[in-house]
């Protein structure tokens, strides 16, 4: 499944939407903090450097700078550094947000 992200041009309305990036949506399971695993999707803009996790109506954006640092933004909040770690051999976590499944790493 491919998703097209669009950007609205100010003052032009929806008719002026133009594609800015193409993301691949990958079905996964996610866990928030220590809650239950639930269906989610990863939207990959650039493999290994820019992606998002969507759990229900919530969205977490991620950026990797290519030198080992990852930042995360939840909703309209500010970007903050997060640590990445593997749990349970098949789930990747960024602070309290975890994902498992066929996660594209690079």
Image (cartoon, rainbow, N blue to C red):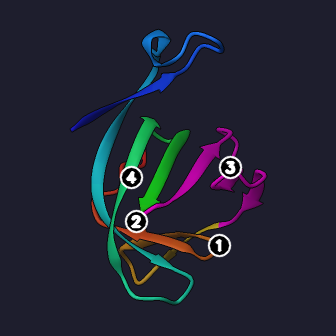
* Pointer 2 or 3: first along the chain: 2
Q: Pointers 3 and 4 in contact (CB under 8 A)?
A: no
* Helix, strand or loop at mark 2: loop
Looking at the rendering, in which quadrant would you find the C terminus? top left
* Pointer 3 or 4: first along the chain: 4
* Helix, strand or loop at mark 1: loop
Which residues fall within the magenta stretch?
Answer: 56-83
| Residue drawn at 60 percent across, 13 percent down | 9
| Residue drawn at 36 percent across, 49 percent down | 104
| Residue drawn at 42 percent across, 68 percent down | 99
Q: Which residue is mark 4?
A: 42
* Pointer 1 or 3: first along the chain: 3
| Alpha carbons under labels 1 and 4: distance apart | 17 Å
Badge 3: residue crowd in 10 Å (few <14, some 14–19, many ≥20) = few
* Helix, strand or loop at mark 3: loop
Q: Which residue is mark 3?
A: 68
* Pointer 2 or 1: first along the chain: 2
């Amino acid at each position: 499944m491919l998703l097209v992200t669009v950007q609205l041009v100010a003052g032009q309305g929806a008719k002026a939407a133009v594609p800015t990036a193409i993301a691949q949506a990958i079905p996964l399971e996610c866990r928030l903090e220590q809650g239950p695993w639930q269906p989610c999707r990863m939207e990959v803009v650039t493999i290994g450097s820019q992606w998002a996790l969507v759990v229900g109506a919530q969205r977490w954006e991620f950026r990797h700078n290519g030198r080992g640092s990852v930042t995360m933004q939840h909703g309209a909040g500010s970007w903050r550094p997060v640590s990445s770690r593997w749990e349970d051999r098949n789930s990747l976590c960024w602070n309290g947000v975890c994902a498992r499944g066929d996660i594209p790493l690079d």
